[in-house]
Amino acid sequence: MSLSTERKRPESAYDAFDSLCTLTAVLNMDGAALFANAALENALGLSRRMLEGSDFAEHFVDPALLRKAMAGARGQDFAALRYEASLRRQAKEALPVQVIVSITEGTGHVLLEMSPLEQQVRQDREERLLEQTQAHKELIRNLAHEIKNPLGGIRGAAQLLEMDLDSPEMREYTQVIVHEADRLQSLVDRLLAPHRHPHLVGDVNIHEVCERVRSLVLVEYPQGLSVRRDYDTSIPEFRGDRAQLIQAVLNIVQNAAQALSARMAQGDACITLRTRVARQVTFGKQRYRLALELHVIDNGPGVPEAIRERIFYPLVSGRDGGSGLGLTLAQTFVQRHDGLIECDSQPGCTDFRILIPLP
């Protein structure tokens, strides 16, 4: 269907939409596209010139949904309408999106905002993770302080009791108390570690961080493990705490190495450190022009499904004897750099992705 398009406003009126990661289009009341932002171009695989002037409903799997919404817009039946639909894409599967239709004031144009449902789920998951991490940090800090004081009293009492005991057999019991008190003290210190260490900011080269971690892990696991490099050397330095980032990456890589014990015995255990620059990304409710994307990928058995959604929670471990603190501390250190760690895991490929904003 051929649609007549009204005279378009200067393109500068819509330039701000190009900075959005939301797929955005501006339509006239006939449903013809007046503007499509860069995110929408990329999603559909069509240029802005091809999109502008087209009947935008035809870009949906079910055009009738948008046409019905446009009829409501012409009748001023709503201020904003929300529904789910699927966008057609060039040589790709249809893209499920959440569509928001709203009428712009004073122009008589219709603003169409489309958020991929997968992206919406991801953003919701990130928001929950950030909220849960903050709540866990407060809980851990308070709990650790409550444990620390009576723990010192128990250890001191056991030592005094040991001084009054003549029987070596009885002293063994007090030594067990002291030893276990020391073990608990070490656990408490690790829980409090992120809150005790100051954030020492300097210039950080992420590949120096990766190389340091790589050398440490290969010393610890000299047989049966290869640590491959896949670096984008164009990534610029950024401001951060080098020691904290080394610890964060090391915790993740050590977790991967421990999960690869069976493959190490076969001699084919592999961890890949991959760096890339991500452009126009959104995480932690913020949108960034550039971000560091560091992947730690292993060919192990994968994260057990029972704990997959809780691996960044404190004291959650998929390994016998694990403290369940390594990933919690890694997430804390990365969040102190306004970043985030995500995990995608299946048998044979577990990918921990660290995202940190770049200047």
Image (tube, grey):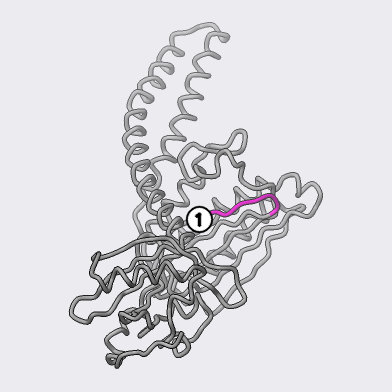
Q: Is residue 354 left or right of residue 273?
A: left
Q: Nearer the viewer, residue 128 or 274?
A: 128
Q: Is residue 185 left or right of residue 228?
A: left
Give the quadrant of residue 356. bottom left
Relative image position of residue 183 (x, y in whole percent): 49, 30
Residue at 62% in and 76% down:
91
Q: Nearer the viewer, residue 261 or 28?
A: 28
| SS under mark 1 | strand
Q: Which residues are magenta?
A: 343-348
Give the quadrant of residue 150. top left
344 in the magenta segment = yes
272 in the magenta segment = no
Q: Considering only vertical position in the picture, is 305 above or below 180?
A: below
Q: Considering only vertical position in the picture, is 88 above or below 327?
A: below
Residue at 56% in and 10% down:
168
Residue at 32% in and 71% down:
71
Q: Is residue 289 left or right of residue 104?
A: right
Q: Amino acid at mark 1?
A: Glu
Which residue position holds label 1?
342
Disc 1 residue crowd, few under 14, some 14–19, many 20+, Cα 10 Å: some
| Magenta part, dominant SS | strand
Q: Considering only vertical position in the picture, is 50 above or below 261?
A: below
Relative image position of residue 264 (x, y in whole percent): 76, 49
| Outermost left residue | 106
Relative image position of residue 125 (x, y in whole percent): 43, 52
**Quadrant location, the C terminus:** bottom left
